[in-house]
Amino acid sequence: MSLIGPNGSGKTSLLRILAGLEKNYSGKVFLNDTDVKKISRKNFSRALSFVMSNKNFRPSYSFSVREIIALGRLPFTGLFGRMTAHDFELIERAAELLKISDLLNRDIMTLSDGERQLVFIAAAVAQDTKIILLDEPTASLDPDKAAQVFDLLKKFSNEGRGIIAAVHDINIASAYSDFYIAIRDGKLIFSGEELTQKILKDLYGVDFVLDLMWRVKN
């Protein structure tokens, strides 16, 4: 599922609410029929992972890439818990899926923005949750890496995981998504399976050339 809309429309705020990081909102959000405000952080993190935008999160300390990815296992091991062979296997697998195994021993502070973003996504993959939220996960990635990430997310979706990604690039959204939520100024503009020229014009205020887009319908 792609969450689309102009800058400042509320995409990040909505994702933070869904991730249980914001408490000051009206209405209710449920996870498996339970109000998220009543779910412990530990249990919440065992069910859902959240990849923040690279622009909203930068490491302040030197950690190896392996250590950063291992943070995804904290909901299951605890802060001082010992990791099992299964935990180490998930860390290695996440690095392989994101094609960053060669970076595992690198210091996170020495990586480019794009490399660092792949590490954060790998940590969410290692968390091994049924739901993954992502805030502009490929904004700092080259096109080939962006396609690689969305290929992986599509694979997860086809396997039954819930994927919700705030996407700035409409071409990527139209290529990979089977459902869209469009918001502007904090209000729902559209939700459904097919985008149209009118929806995009209402959302962004400009015309879109449909033959440059992969799946948008007239």
Image (cartoon, rainbow, N blue to C red):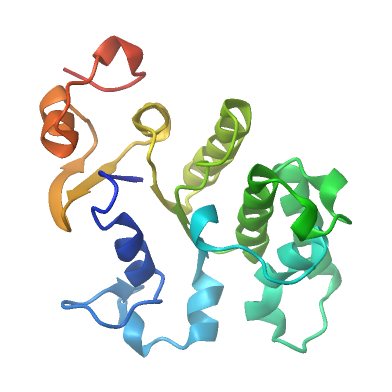
Report x, y in % for residue 83: 81, 77
Based on the displayed image, in which of its 4 quarters is residue 218 positioned?
Answer: top left
| Residue at x 20%, y 49% (from the top left corner) | 183
- Residue 130 visible? The answer is no
| Residue at x 14%, y 52% (from the top left corner) | 188
- Above or below for 216 versus 113: above
Outermost top residue? 211
Task: For the N terminus, give its image quadrant.
Answer: top left
- Above or below for 75 versus 150: below
Report x, y in % for residue 80: 77, 89
| Residue at x 34%, y 36% (from the top left corner) | 178
| Residue at x 26%, y 44% (from the top left corner) | 6
Q: Nearer the viewer, residue 193 or 170?
A: 170
Report x, y in % for residue 45: 53, 75
Total labels: the figure holds: 0
- Residue 218 visible? The answer is yes
Report x, y in % for residue 193: 24, 36
Q: Nearer the viewer, residue 8 or 210?
A: 8
- Above or below for 132 versus 152: below
Q: Nearer the viewer, residue 182 or 53?
A: 53
With 50 as the anchor, is 217 left or right in this view? left
With 79 as the anchor, is 137 left or right in this view? left
